Amino acid sequence: MTSKQRFGEIDLLRAIAIVLMVIFHLVYDLREFAGVKINYQDPFWFLLGKTSAILFIFLSGLASGFSRSPVRRGVKVLLLGMGITGVTYLALGDMYVRFGILHFLGVTMILAPFLSSLASSILWALAGASVLLGLWFKKTLVETSLLIPFGLLYKGFGSIDYYPLLPYSSATFLGILAYRHFYAQKLEPVFTLNLNSKPIIWLSRNSLMIYLVHQPIILFVIFSFKFIEHF
């Protein structure tokens, strides 16, 4: 989507997604690194975090219809995900990010031109199959780590960020269908949401950058306070 062609409802949803993600990670970090007694696995916090991720995935599928170079963008995002894998491996050991949200988005962006060429009926079928297979795979263990991207895990697997292609690609398929149904061949926003909020537009435009820097900032603040308290 170019800067000259923005849709207020998409900017608003992307801004909501990044704010929810920052809140969830703040809660997680406060529990894990500051010792604050808050359970991020409670249904409320769990749903907040998943809602954020699924919104990002859905919007990525939708936005692929506007993008002129989804493959190039996908390669960039996938490389950033691999960078996070390296950093978290050094910092966290066995809990490092193997196939997190950026890996997922990078792969689906690269596949977007092919997926967008499929008939709507096939995309609906793939969305349903993705959910069913994802639920099945969740109960299945394998002896290899090569199938991690597809949701098939080995005994003892652990990762602080994991979004396999199955079942989450269902949100990608729905995003592509949403673009096709509501936006393709249309020059005006579907819901005529004329968004003039500069903070929301800024959050939407810079969501990837915010995703990359918010965790280091949160951890810096937490450890700074812990250092000050120590003295």
Image (spheres, rainbow, N blue to C red):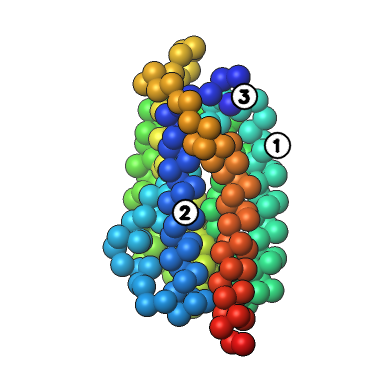
**Residue 181 visible from this viewpoint:** no
Picture quadrant where residue 138 is located: bottom left
The x, y position of residue 63, in whole percent, is 53, 31
Label pair 2/1, CB-CB below 8 angstroms: no
Of residues 218 and 62, the one nearer the viewer is 218
- The local crowd at label 1, few if under 14, some if 14 to 19, many if 20 or more residues have their Cα within 10 Å, is few
Using the rendered image of the protein, determine whether residue 187 is visible from the camera's viewpoint.
yes
What residue is shown at x 40% (from left), y 23% (from top)? 193
Disc 2 from disc 3: Cα separation: 24 Å
SS of the residue under disc 3: loop
- Residue 148 rendering spot, x and y as whole percentages: 54, 62
Q: Residue at x 55, y 58 (%)?
A: 100
Q: Residue at x 62, y 68 (%)?
A: 220
Q: Position of residue 113 (x, y in %)?
A: 59, 30
Mark 1 or mark 3, whichever is nearer to me: 3
Can you name the residue that lies furthest to the bottom here?
231
Would you place residue 1 above or below residue 49 in this image? above
Q: Which residue is mark 3?
A: 2
Q: N-terminal of the two: label 1 or label 3?
A: 3
- 65 and 12: which is toward the camera: 12
Q: Secondary structure at mark 1?
A: helix
Q: Which mark is residue 21?
A: 2
Quadrant location, the N terminus: top right
Q: Which mark is residue 171?
A: none
The residue nearer to you, when weighing 157 against 50, is 50
The residue under label 1 is which amino acid type?
Arg
Q: Which residue is mark 1?
A: 72
